[in-house]
Amino acid sequence: MDRYRFILSGGGTGGHIYPAVAIANELKRRYPDAEFLFVGAKDKMEMEKVPQAGYEIKGLWISGIQRKLTLKNLMFPFKLISSLLEARKIVKQFKPHVAIGTGGFASGPLLKMAESSGIPCVLQEQNSFAGITNKLLAGKAEKICVAYDGMERFFPKEKIIKTGNPIRTDLVDVKAGKQEAATFFGLNVDKKTILVLGGSLGARRINQLIEKELGFFEEKGLQILWQCGKLYYEEYKKYDSDSVKVLAFVNRMDLAYAAADVIISRAGAGSVSELCLVGKPVIFIPSPNVAEDHQTQNAKALVAQDAAIMLRESELDVEFEHSFSDLIGSEENKKKLGKNIKKMAMPKATEHIVDEIEKLLKK
């Protein structure tokens, strides 16, 4: 067999890029001689992140449709045609054995052209509410790897394989003890710790909530490990103290998870999958500003299994203190949520996705 060639596309956000890189890494582990090519959107973060991960990437001139009439929308048909032509050229030159799409706009033209050239395509959908690109591509894909039950409302049932989402296992392999974690962050090992995660850029509404509730947390004798995001660090660093640790970014997530008694987080697909492995009680505050409100759907899927608490941004002022007090005051509640979320973990997701890709190579 000549060397396998894999073409991967997914981007726009880390939630699409990271799974594509994880899949490539596992394929590379199994096929060290294989060739890899990523295709992304020219002005998006994948153009920086993929080369950092050690892979070549080509950019298409593509973007999503805005919800209101803008110049960008008027340009969309031209961008789409340009991207389809460029994608066709890339596919012709690279001659991949399999094309893999993890969502995001650039994966649309690429997988469309791969499929029309007779190349088997695999989709990976991270969310419980499928993205528009994957829904459009589903009819022609060979296999669709998903992380949630009930995805047949979006995709042909016979193509769906529940694998889970690729996650950074190094982050969640929580071998570290509480003592090591407390020492690293300068926390008190005898106090309960609330870990607040709003993503690398930060989540404005979560930061506003934590700022407002600092007195409430102090009354309850809690300490806060608060990742406020690099966009907000200058605004919130003034609150850094012995019992409140304000960080722009958490470099040692394994230790942050080890320190945490309760976690407050957004509900992006990657975060949810990671937190299932961690197995600690979580309060999800979904971002309402994402496509198809998919974070709310992701969180609801866990709430339905009694595996997490969800609070909408609009409920925080009225509901937060009550819901939080109920949770932090009950060891039984915390244990139940931790146990149930852990049951939903799929730690071998990347391997299972690559197993499915391998089956196509053997066809």
Image (cartoon, helix red, strand yellow):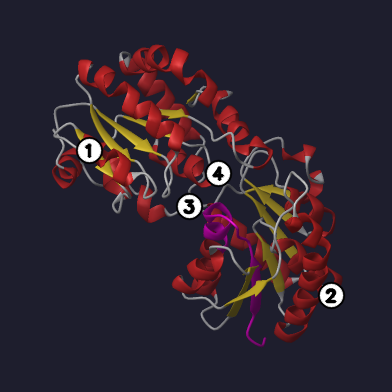
Question: How far apart are the alpha carbons under marks 1 and 4?
Answer: 31 Å
Instruction: First in sequence, mark 4 or 2: give its number.
Output: 2
Q: Residue at x 75, y 48 (%)?
A: 132
Question: How far apart are the alpha carbons under marks 4 and 2?
Answer: 31 Å
**What amino acid is found at the position of numbered circle 4 in the picture?**
Ala
Q: Residue at x 58, y 81 (%)?
A: 34
Q: Residue at x 56, y 55 (%)?
A: 13
Instruction: First in sequence, mark 2 or 1: give its number.
Output: 2
**Location of residue 118 (image quadrant):** bottom right
**What amino acid is found at the position of numbered circle 2 in the picture?**
Ser
Q: Which residue is mark 4?
A: 269
Instruction: First in sequence, mark 1 or 3: give its number.
Output: 3
Q: Which residue is mark 2?
A: 117
Q: Nearer the viewer, mark 1 or mark 4?
A: 1
Instruction: First in sequence, mark 3 or 2: give its number.
Output: 2
Give neighbour class at mark 4: few <14, some 14-19, many 20+ (Cα, 10 Å): many
**Residue 280 seen in the current view:** no
Looking at the picture, how far across and down is residue 307, in whole percent?
49, 26
**Which type of secondary structure does the marked residue at label 1 adopt?**
helix
> On the rendered structure, is 252 left or right of 143?
left
Instruction: First in sequence, mark 3 or 4: give its number.
Output: 3
**What amino acid is found at the position of numbered circle 1 in the picture?**
Lys
Give neighbour class at mark 1: few <14, some 14-19, many 20+ (Cα, 10 Å): few
- Identify the magenta region: 1-20
**Location of residue 216 (image quadrant):** top left
Question: How far apart are the alpha carbons under marks 3 and 4?
Answer: 10 Å
Instruction: First in sequence, mark 1 or 4: give its number.
Output: 1
Where is 248 relative to 60, above or below? Answer: above
Q: Which residue is mark 3?
A: 167
Q: Which residue is mark 1?
A: 238
Screen quadrant of the N terminus: bottom right
